[in-house]
Image (spheres, grey):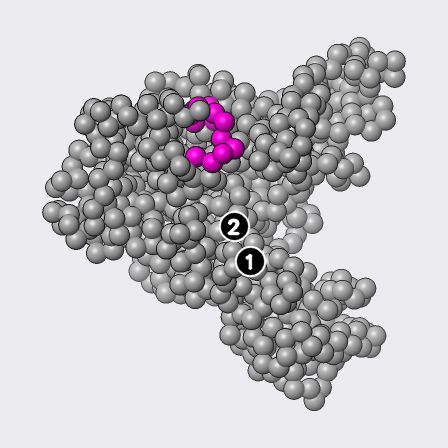
Amino acid sequence: MLKRIALLGFVLTATGCSPSDVSKASEASDPLPGEGADIGKTVLYRDTWGIPHIYAPTVEAGLFAQGYAQAEDRPMQLLLNLKIAMGELSEVNGEDGIPIDLLSHLFNHYGNGKAATASLDTRHRAYIDAYTAGINAFYGTHPEDVPDFWRHHEVTSAMVDAFGRMFLYNWSIDEALEDLRRAGIEPGFVTANRGSNQWAISPHRTANGDAMLLIDPHLSWWGPSRFWEMRVHAGDWHGSGVGLAGSPYIGLGHNADVAWAMTTGGPDTADVYELQLNPDDPEQYLYDGAWRDIRSTEVTLDVARADARTYRLRFSHHGPIVATQGERAYAAKVPYTADTDRILAWEKLNFAKDYRGAMEACATLAMFPQNVMVADTSGNIYYQRTGRVPVRPDGYDWSRPVDGSTSASEWQGVHPASDHLQVVNPPQGYLQNCNIPPDAMIPDGPFSLDAQPDYLYSGPGYGPARAGWTNQRGARALELLSGDADVTVDEALAWAVDTRPYGLARWLDVLSRAVVDNAHVDAILAWDGRLTRDSAAALKYAYWRYQLEEHPGGAALRSAIDDHYALVSGRTPKTIELSEAQYEVIAQTFGAAMSRLTTELGDGAVWGDVYRVGRDDRSWPVGGGGGDRWGLTTLRSMGYGEPDDSFQRHGRHGQTSTQLVVLSKPIRSWIYLPVGQSDRPDSTHYDDQAEHLFSERRMKPSWWLPEDLAPNIESRTVLPYPSQTASR
């Protein structure tokens, strides 16, 4: 199985390039990484958090080192990510993986990856091949790290491209599935839970006169979305940030001139067409008065711990059929095809010189539906609500399945990026988007739902309505940004990990009216309002809000008390008017919550006794929360699992790879991961960030520059990549 990979390792060694030449930093003869003995070599440094810092003479060599380091840190997850993209997860996960595999086959990620990589020009093919060669070089010299489930001879560039497509374009696929659910049709496929924070500040609102950018994705801490951290100096490629195991370049982060962030939310990039099936032949559907044949293919899935399964997949000219009800079938249509060069968009970001490079990335129309926010060292901040957006004919509700029996409903091309909502250097001096509509980003902002088609303004799945609302994170970000015209780096770092839920004062007011002469209420009223790991009052408040949400009247109370959008519109928040019965609900649920808290945890329990971060059987207390319906969402957003037998809730998703970037010359940046860099249980970097950074709510400096890295080196490895390879 591994002959070709092993042969590659043998050839590299035989040609005089040792696969690894590891030494401690104290043994290096050169004062700074990238100089002296490093010149002309591809060198992989590891800092004291286990983060790879790549120094290489060419871009190709840097990509080779990136692939090598990813495989070294995430040997199982990288190959599992590729198998998901190829539709082979059921070989590992058994029957639970079948729906995911079928979705990958329906949208042909691997087939599109093969076609896309085959059509790349020489330079871009050299780049992705170099990255793939690094992955294979690691597995070739470390066959013990190849998991048993991997049955392919080697990793190919088509697999890598397929993984990128699967991860990015599932945003659009999920949009289509949600269109079905809005029509009351369950397709049987799971959609992901996604979120993020981002904000940018112009130089005239910062104390140091430099722009700032927060990059704060909120995804699952496990599986394909678990970010991997890196630094690189390779030819013209310089950067710091995070990516995914199995994908080249920096996904979110900065280079020497530009920083970029993305949050979930964007235009509507996918639709569902309802097909009328022929009652005499269900393998045909009506289109423009004639019956068309449904195209079909079979796929056989090898299923772990079970027999192989064969499925028949069906396709219309609109796209794959994802659901059938009686004489109606439903085809999902997304605009991302094999011709969509998703790697090109990230290359443009990685090599951008200012915000206009991000505009070029968006202009590729390869971006998935996102809020792209950018800051550069020239002092610009920029935003685009991007995606590959179909031009749709009028007269249809595109948030639900539309009539697929007529050419009148066909897409009429794709909107150019110039049609997208975008702004550069708004007069307010800041921007923020925490999964909110464009009108809620800044007061008196430039965006209005009436100015363009609603589907271009926002996809219907990103909130309760396309405009006129915001969430707790968006309101809190706006509160902080609008109230400070001289932001320091320390303040920005504190905002990135802020633990105060917006709108709390209104809830404390009604609680004080409903319950008097109560020690628990007195403790909550004396509280600083932050969900910190050592706060007993925060835990009391959480227990009450959980109890209230279980009451049939909880939703009505939220509607009467919360008014986050008042901050956006500049009006006075609405007056809270509750009935006596509602005050009684508050009193009753509060009493029940305090009794429950005492029974479960005793007296004196604090937030961190319940809310934990960690891995396997080790965990540490952590501050911050999530869940607007409980009023517990903070900018330091986290989603927790259900209570275990000890009533502890362990973090599962939320802040995935938070970065603060100061666009000075040179750039400075800070970052942390929720758990650790390595997937190896015997590594000190398996959960070190959970214990020493995430639990403590402390971001670490990136040590991006060689002079910053030099005193913080843990190891140095020379990798076997030829130095004479041509570069960008």
At a point 49% along the width and 61% down the height, the residue shown is 618
Q: Position of residue 185 (x, y in %)?
A: 78, 36
Return the x and y of residue 656 as percentages of the image width and height: 48, 51
Left or right of residue 308: residue 424 = left
Extreme residue in the bottom direction = 517
Q: Nearer the viewer, residue 587 or 146?
A: 146
Q: Earlier in the sequence, mark 1 or mark 2?
A: 2
Which secondary structure type mostly characterizes the magenta part of the structure? loop
Residue found at x 65% / y 82%: 520
> Residue 170 location in percent, x, y?
59, 35
Residue position for label 2: 221
Residue picked out by circle 1: 651
Q: Residue at x 82, y 29 (%)?
A: 325
Q: CA distance from mark 1 to mark 2?
A: 8 Å
- Residue 578, quarter of picture: bottom right
Q: Are marks 1 and 2 in contact (CB under 8 Å)?
A: yes
For residue 126, side relative to residue 456 (left or right): left
On residue 536, the disc is: none
For this rendering, which residue is in front, 429 or 16?
Answer: 16
> Which quarter shows the C terminus?
top left
**Of the residues shown, which amino acid type is indicated by label 2?**
Trp
> Which stretch is magenta?
146-159
Helix, strand or loop at label 1? It is: strand
Quarter location, residue 670:
bottom left
SS assignment at label 2:
loop
Neighbor class of circle 1 (other Cα within 10 Å; few <14, some 14-19, many 20+) is many
- Pick whichever, 666 or 312, lies toward us: 312
User: Is residue 487 positioned above or below 100 on the image?
Assistant: below
